[in-house]
Amino acid sequence: MNLKTLPILLAFLLMGVADAMGPLSEAVGKNYQLSTVVATLMASAVFIAFAVFSVPGGWLAARIGKKKVLLLGLGLNTLAVAVPAFTTPPYALLLVCVFFLGVGTTFLQVAGNPIMRDVSAEGKYSRNLALAQGFKGVGSVSANYLPVLVGSIGVLAVMGWRGAFPIYFGLMAIAFVLVAMMHIDETKADEPPGIGESLALLKNPVFALAVLGIFLYVGSEVCMATFLKPTLEAFDMSPDRAKLLGTVMFFGFLAFGRIVAGSININPHLFFRLSALLGLAGSGLVMTGDQTLTLIGVVLGGLGFANIWPMLFSITVEEKPERASELSGLMCMAIAGGALVPQVMAKLIDNGMAHSLAFIVPVICFVYLTILSFRSKPKPAA
């Protein structure tokens, strides 16, 4: 890691703020006296932003540069969190702010993943991207727990559910300044493509299979985040203990796995296979319905899920680094899998399937990812 990567790592850390909107929706719903469906529109707004703006974000990065798109994302996020930081908005305005937070975070993802290649030393991209995703994981966990921590801090405590937003605002503004001060030699295409040309990349089977892999991976991760707690509650665990040993432990090992991968020299192709196999084993153990095996599955799942994104992303970008921005847009668009794949699992549960058996959904997703990992081979030396 070098000093150039530090502002980019801070940007990745702040991507986690958007992940906090789902959990925050419960407190917001109580404050505005909303139904559960209306309150959860906060999380939906983020996924919609990713689905709609990822490809245009990649096109924009290819046209004006990744650094400018990164600054645009940080600027949008700073403005989005400023509204609840300094006033109590009507819920409709809050939803608009959350949507623009999703748009800004989309731009951060679209530009941040490939720009890490531009600031990384030769051969260090996969490692640095894994570390960056580890920072994003830490940011997600921190953003989720920050509202609880500020509940005991003077004026922030008085603000209730809004208490964390002044801190989000300050960090976003600092990140904007630090990134603006950076000089980055960006890898660019000779001829900036149009959106149609970006989508045409999907005609290449390598890219199409990778985008589907990201779609299934993100969907599987949201399945784990959503359904581990009720699965453990079925073992007569209290809700707090089920959350600790389920969602919290899963994301804890996920962040740990990314930070470890970002601290060592790794072969991205080999690490992708290992990650896919661990993720398959972990989700498969959760399916057993045995408490001990389920907890082991949570640990293995966290470690396995940890590096699917950075390994698959970096391997794909290395196929055509001059098209990194467009490829990033396509793969970030696939984050929409986080909205769709869990719906399949929820439907199985609503139809009477046990929570543990419904984990067949992430198992099937990881069967695909495992097959994809064994298809992945290093490019021959020139």
Image (cartoon, grey):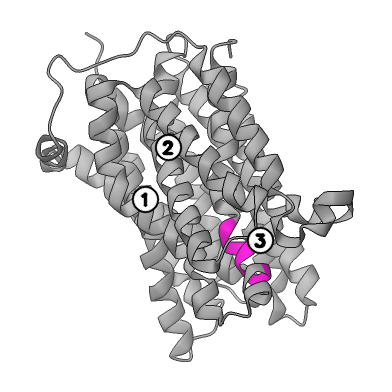
Q: Earlier in the sequence, mark 1 or mark 3?
A: 1
**Would residue 223 appear left or right of 159 to someone viewing this image?**
left
Q: Residue 224 vs residue 213: left or right?
A: right
Name which residue lies at 54% across and 67% down: 91
Q: CA distance from mark 1 to mark 2?
A: 9 Å
Residue drawn at (89%, 50%) of the image: 154
Q: Is residue 237 above or below residue 123?
A: below
Badge number at residue 35? none
Residue indicated by mark 3: 247
For the point 43% across and 60% down, the residue is 45
> Which residue matches tag 2?
109
Q: Is residue 49 left or right of residue 154?
A: left
Q: CA distance from mark 1 to mark 3?
A: 23 Å
Mark 3 neighbour class, 10 Å CA radius: few under 14, some 14 to 19, many 20 or more? some
Q: Tell me which secondary structure the magenta stretch mostly adopts.
A: helix
Label 2 crowd (10 A; few <14 / some 14-19 / many >=20): many
CA separation in Å, label 3 and label 2: 23 Å
Disc with the residue nearer the chain's start (3 vs 2): 2
Q: Which amino acid does the dot numbered 2 rest on?
A: Gln
Q: Amino acid at mark 3?
A: Thr
Tell me the magenta residue range: 21-27
x, y percent for residue 144: 68, 54
Please state, as top left, top right, bottom left or bottom right, where the N terminus lies in the image. top right
